[in-house]
Structures are given as C-alpha cells and as structure tokens.
Image: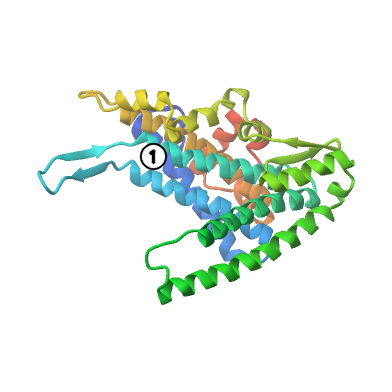
Amino acid sequence: MINEEKIISQLLFDDSDLTRRLRFKIVIDAGFKLLFDHAKENKITNPIDLDANSLFQMSLMKSLSIVKLLEGLNYVDDRNGDNLTNIMDPFTIGGIVRSQFEAYCLFNHVFIQSKTKEEIEYKYYLWVIAGLKERQNFERSLSKSSYKGQDSVEYTKIRAANKIKAANEAQSILKYQKIIFNNRLIQNLSPDEAEKIQSALKKKNYQIKIESGKVIEVRWHEMFLNSGTDEKMEETYRYLCQYSHPSNISAFQFKDLYQKGKNHSIEMSYFVIKYSEIIMSFFTRDYCQYFLDLNKKWNTLPNIPRNVLFQNNNALRGKEFAFII
C-alpha cells in the first residue's frame, strides 16, 4: 500500500536531484491537467482571456523544454569523433526560466493585481500596442533592406502579405489607443499624468500601473514582489539575468562549470529548475484564480500535486495564496 504521507514528506523536504526533478514534473503535470480541463469545459472567445490563457500555456511548454535539457546534451564531431556526452547546460535552462519569470509577472500584473475590468483593459492594451509597434519596426526595416533573391515571385508574395498585415496592425494600434484613452481610469488622470501614458505608448513600455492618480512604472522584480512573494525572492530576476547576459560573472561561472570530476553543471541546473518550479507553482495558482471555472479545481487537486503546489505558494507568498476562496 502506498504511503502518501511519506511520499509527500519526501517531496517537500528532500532536496536530492531525483526529488527535485520529480517535484518539477508534478508541478508541470498539474498545470497541464488544469489547462486541458479548462479547454474541454470552456471555449474562450474574448481576446483578453485568450492571451491570458496563452501566457500560461507558453510557460508550461517551456517547462517541457527544460525537462528535455535535463536529459543531457550530446555532440559528436563527424570529422574526428570528438564528443560531448550528457552535458548539462544550466545557462540555457536559466534563460528559459527567465522568460517564464517575465510571463508570470506580466500575467499577475495584468490579470491578478487589477481590481477592475477597466484596469485589466488599459494594462492589456498597453502590452498589445507595444508588441504591434515592434512588428511595425520590423516591416520598416525590411522595406529599407535588400536581399539576394528579393525579386523572386515567392519573396514578392511574402512582402506583399507582410505589407497588408502591417497596414492592418497599424489600424489596430490606433483602435487600441482609442480604447485606452476612453478608459475611465485614464480619463480621470491629470494632464501631466495622462502625458505619461502617451510617453509609455511612444516608448513601447507596458510595465505601468495607476495608483492614487499617479502613473507608476513597475519593474520586473517589483511585479514579482507585488504578486505576494517573500522579500528574499527580490533578487530572483537579477540572478536569472546572469544566465541570459554575457556578463563577466556568467563567463567565469561557465569557465568553472565543467571541471573534470566535478558536478557543478548538474548542481547549477537543478538549482535553477527550483526557480522554475516555484514560478510555475505561482502561475498555476493565479491561472486558477483568474479563470472562475478553475477556482474549485485548484482546491480539489489530488493530494500529492496539491501539497507541492500549496507548499510553494504558502511558504513563499503566504497562507492566503495557498487556497482560492
């Protein structure tokens, strides 16, 4: 007979590589179960909710990439047989976890921190416009560039389609800007504060909130703290950035990573996936809070995944985040 209490205790308090990997898989499986349940029971048509769902799904998919990387990388040079076997790459894993961090922070900032639909609306469309404006830049850049084969029929068709798409998206930007400036929360701003919204749109900055009539920029690490995390987690984003940026720290860490007889790469990889486990535990809980049909499902998950997810939220965010009322 399986002793569930013993399994749960080991999962929560044993920090061996095997247990960390199992705990990570449990979090991913719970996330996918809730995602699939939501898809089966609901047809999402609202574009805002569709994008909320996509942020969660994207982050879960990235967890699968991490699982694959934990299997180890292999390489063989076909010319002379030189090879690398079962190499762990914590830097690539860290880059993926950083993207999960940002996706979670954005989700929490837009969909959980917002107290009204109007607040969700202006935050959401600031984000959408920033993305569309980036694509407008790509189109302008392509129109000024020359490529080998650009006179081909296929390339001409692609360029024509892209120009139509860019024109349509330019109209969407104007439409969404009107939605923002017709929003009651924006209309209630003083002229000086409203100008900050104009500036944010110009700079493609969507990390904005309105508090007591003031427009405030919210950095990634501040979004993470706003989600209820313990202050000791404040440096999480800076730590994850070390894996993505070519800083001197990342260079000298890499230099010492694969010393013969040492397990630094394995140790670092499993240390980094702990952050992914935590982020996806937070994300799964908030996903269930946002989509009403999943509220009860969060509290009625099977014992083992419920305890892992609840413990991560309870220990690092507080008891009020372990349950959804």
Q: Residue 52, relative to residue 46: is it above or below?
A: above
* Relative side of 18 to 160, left or right: left
Residue occupying the far left of the picture: 80
User: Residue 322's x, y, as percent?
Assistant: 63, 37
Residue at image position (41%, 62%) is: 147
In this view, the residue in front, 231 or 245, is 245
Depth check: 139 or 54 in front?
Answer: 139
Give percent across and percent down for residue 77: 16, 45
Quarter of the C terminus within the rendering: top right
Q: Residue at x 57, y 26 (%)?
A: 233
Quarter-wise, where is residue 170 in the image?
bottom right
- Judge from the rendering whether residue 264 lies leftward or rightward of residue 217; answer left or right: left
Q: Is residue 46 visible?
A: no
State the SS at label 1. helix
* Amino acid tagged 1: Thr
Q: Position of residue 54 (x, y in %)?
A: 57, 56
Between 111 and 2, the one lying in front of the other is: 111
Look at 26% across and 28% down and name the residue there.
258
Q: Label 1 belongs to which residue?
A: 92
Seen as rendered, the residue at the extreme bottom is 153
Residue 40 lies, in percent from the top left, at 56, 65
Q: Say few, some or many: other residues with alpha carbon within 10 Å of mark 1 (under 14 / 14 to 19 / 20 or more).
A: some
Residue sitting at x 50%, y 53%: 32
Report whether residue 188 is seen: yes
Image-based side of 98 in relation to 14, left or right: right
